[in-house]
Amino acid sequence: MKFFLDTADVDAIRELNELGMVDGVTTNPSLILKAGRNIEDVTAEICGMVSGPVSAEVVADKADDMIREGKHLARIAKNIAVKVPLTWDGLRACRALSDAGHMVNVTLCFSPAQAILAAKAGATFISPFIGRLDDIHLDGVDLIADIREIYDNYGYETQILAASIRSVNHIVEVAKIGSDVITAPPAVIKAMAKHVLTDKGLEQFTADWAKTGQKIG
Ligand code: E4P
């Protein structure tokens, strides 16, 4: 399963990238706002750090404008994946950008029906939003399972990019289902290393080691 970082924070990307854990990055207008930087500057910097796909989102609502914005964003670097919303105009833009040779990430997916349309429109990635479904008391992980089953039934090549991830459990559950990619905030990725028994065990080993009076090296 590929790990994408869901952030436009270059310091956070650098830290995890040094461990070889970053297969790509996703951004959106809210994350660009949070970074407080110009979209083209920060996206170019991220693309220079990470060799995998870096999603940059269009903001227009009409297909022709999305295509124009998408082509503009794609000029930033070869590894740009143009992110378009799952609207009818977004699907039209997806088809045009995909046919022009660009990677396309179709975002704001909340149903299996939407995911089928994205695959038919030539999407490279489909981004179902798990956390936002959980927020309205639906099961976001179930959506990933449904899309996996449907895509496998027909051999659709669109990659499932589980998005809006809020917890370590989300990552484990979608990994069991076979999501191709997860995109998560750096803090959630780092939280995967934490376990209370690891902390407790280390505490005991440290205390016992001090009692031996020994040193290594
Ligand atoms: C990524 O592509 C999405 O934009 C992101 O995961 C949304 O996450 P959120 O629901 O936490 O804003």
Image: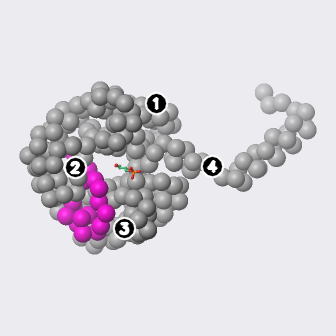
Say whether residue 105 is left or right of residue 50: left
How packed mark 3 is, by other alpha carbons closer than 10 Å (few <14, some 14-19, many 20 or more), is: many
How packed mark 1 is, by other alpha carbons closer than 10 Å (few <14, some 14-19, many 20 or more), is: few
Name the secondary structure under disc 3: helix
The residue carrying mark 3 is 143
Residue at 87% in and 36% down: 210
Picture coordinates of residue 78, whole percent (x, y): 23, 35
State how far apart marks 4 and 2 are (Cα). 35 Å
Say whether residue 88 is left or right of residue 9: left
Please state which of the two labelled residues, at mark 4 or mark 2, is closer to the viewer.
2
Tell me which segment is drawn in magenta.
99-119
**Which label is found at residue 194?**
4
Residue type highlighted by circle 2? Val
The image quarter containing residue 88 is bottom left
In primary-sequence order, the first of circles 3 and 4 is 3
In primary-sequence order, the first of circles 1 and 2 is 1
Picture coordinates of residue 149, whole percent (x, y): 33, 71
Q: Can residue 178 be seen in this view?
A: no
Colouring method of the image: one colour
State how far apart marks 3 and 4 are (Cα). 27 Å
The residue carrying mark 2 is 84
Name the secondary structure under disc 4: loop
The residue carrying mark 1 is 11
Say whether residue 203 is left or right of residue 114: right
Q: Quadrant of the N terminus?
A: bottom left
In primary-sequence order, the first of circles 2 and 3 is 2
Name the secondary structure under disc 1: helix
